[in-house]
Every structure is written in structure tokens, then in C-alpha cells.
Image: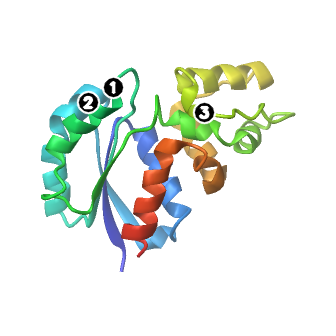
């Protein structure tokens, strides 16, 4: 039987990346995603509590909330979201805050970037992708510099995530709680 997973994220490209990540842990037929997209952080913050209720009522066994850190203070952002997605109400939930942006996780796999864009050489490995300011723009500039190709997060994020390895994602501190949650809660 397929597990229903509720995902709340800022944009549609985040949802496609999350789907690709989940497929690294389980067969695509083993789960389905029901989603709400905030189209930015403001709406996500305001609506995530109501969305979590709707996802839960529609049969979602797990609620995954993704909110980029951007220029926020992580503890304050987590506290704000935790008040809306309370553990006592949603015990099978997790709030994931990629440091800066979800694209930092994609930057962790230079081989995947090389393959997706058919670059002659892989980008230089970044030792700590989560220290990159504006990872989405960094990825765009990197791809243009190395191959004179245009990067569109709506198209390419999913492709990079599909090719990327979990081991490279694990290089990102903000990814590790997601890995642990998937292994211990969803796949258990």
C-alpha cells in the first residue's frame, strides 16, 4: 500500500526535488505526495497550519514542511513554524529548513550538475554548500560560466536531484534531519 506524504513547500520546484529525494529511499509506487505550495515564504508561514490540517484529514501519514532559511534566523523561523505544526498535533511531521535555499543541496553534487548540463568538466567541489549566499543564483552563474547554458530552477532542479547522490546531500547539515526522518519514520 502506498504511503501518503503531505508536503508543504515554497514553490513547485521544491516539490519535484523532494519527490526525487523520496525516490532515493523508496520505490515511486510506495508513496504519493499531496502538496501545498506557498509561492513564497509569507503565504507558507501564514497558511501552513491550515494546510497541515487539510493534509492530515485527507489521509497523509506524514507532513513534511520545507522553508528556505534565506536571511532569517533559523531558531526564530523554526519556532514560528513549530507553533503552527505542533508535534503533539502532528507527531509524524518534520520542519526542514535548508540553509539559505534548497539549491544548496543541489550544489553538493558537482557530478550531477555536470551531467544535467552536459558540461565538459564538473564544477569545482564546494566544501560547504550551505555557506554559499544565494545558492540559486550561484548555480545559475556557475552553469553559465562553465557551459554558457541557462539554468532554470523550474526545469533543472528536478533533473539535478534525480542524478544527485544521497551521500552528497548528506554533506549538507540541514539535509541530515530529513534523511533520519525518512529512514526512521517513513521507511520503518
Q: Locate residue 11 relative to residue 149 in the image: left or right.
A: left
Residue at image mark 3: 129
Judge by depth and name the residue closer to the eye, 22 or 75: 75
Sequence order check: which comes first, mark 1 or mark 3?
A: 1
Marks counted in the figure total 3
Residue 142, position as x, y percentages in the image: 70, 23
Q: Residue at x 29, y 28 (%)?
A: 41
Q: Position of residue 61 (x, y in %)?
A: 26, 67
- Indicate which label's residue lies in the foreground, 1 or 3: 1
Mark 1 element type: loop
Please give the name of the residue rendered at 70% of the width and 38% of the height, measured from the top-left corner: 113
132 to 103, vertically: above or below: above
Q: Is residue 185 left or right of residue 114?
A: left
Q: CA distance from mark 1 to mark 3?
A: 18 Å
Give the answer, above or below, for where 28 lies relative to 8. Answer: below
| SS label for mark 3 | helix
Q: Nearer the viewer, residue 161 or 184?
A: 184
Pointers 2 and 3 in contact (C-beta within 8 Å)? no
Kindly give the residue lying farthest to the front in the view shown: 75
Q: Is residue 126 left or right of residue 5?
A: right
Labels 1 and 2 touching (C-beta < 8 A): yes
In which quarter of the view is residue 107 placed? Answer: top right
Q: Nearer the viewer, mark 2 or mark 3?
A: 2
Tag 2 residue: 76
The residue labelled by disc 1 is 73
SS under mark 2: helix
Describe the colour scheme in one phrase: rainbow
Amino acid at each position: 500500500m502506498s504511503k501518503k506524504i503531505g508536503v508543504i513547500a515554497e514553490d513547485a520546484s521544491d516539490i519535484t526535488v523532494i519527490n526525487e529525494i523520496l525516490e532515493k529511499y523508496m520505490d515511486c509506487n510506495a508513496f504519493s505526495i499531496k502538496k501545498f505550495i506557498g509561492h513564497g515564504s509569507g503565504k507558507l508561514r501564514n497558511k501552513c497550519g491550515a494546510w497541515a490540517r487539510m493534509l492530515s484529514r485527507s489521509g497523509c501519514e506524514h507532513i513534511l514542511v520545507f522553508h528556505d532559511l534565506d536571511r532569517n534566523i533559523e531558531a526564530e523561523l523554526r519556532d514560528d513554524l513549530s507553533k503552527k505544526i505542533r508535534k503533539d498535533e502532528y507527531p509524524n511531521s518534520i520542519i526542514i529548513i535548508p540553509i539559505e535555499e534548497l539549491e544548496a543541496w543541489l550544489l553538493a553534487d558537482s557530478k550531477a550538475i555536470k551531467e544535467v548540463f552536459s558540461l565538459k568538466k564538473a564544477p569545482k567541489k564546494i566544501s560547504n554548500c550551505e555557506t554559499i549566499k544565494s545558492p540559486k543564483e550561484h548555480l545559475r552563474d556557475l552553469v553559465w560560466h562553465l557551459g554558457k547554458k541557462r539554468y532554470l530552477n523550474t526545469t533543472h532542479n528536478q533533473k539535478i536531484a534525480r542524478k544527485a547522490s544521497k551521500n552528497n546531500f548528506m554533506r549538507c547539515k540541514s539535509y541530515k534531519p530529513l534523511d533520519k526522518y525518512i529512514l526512521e519514520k517513513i521507511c520503518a
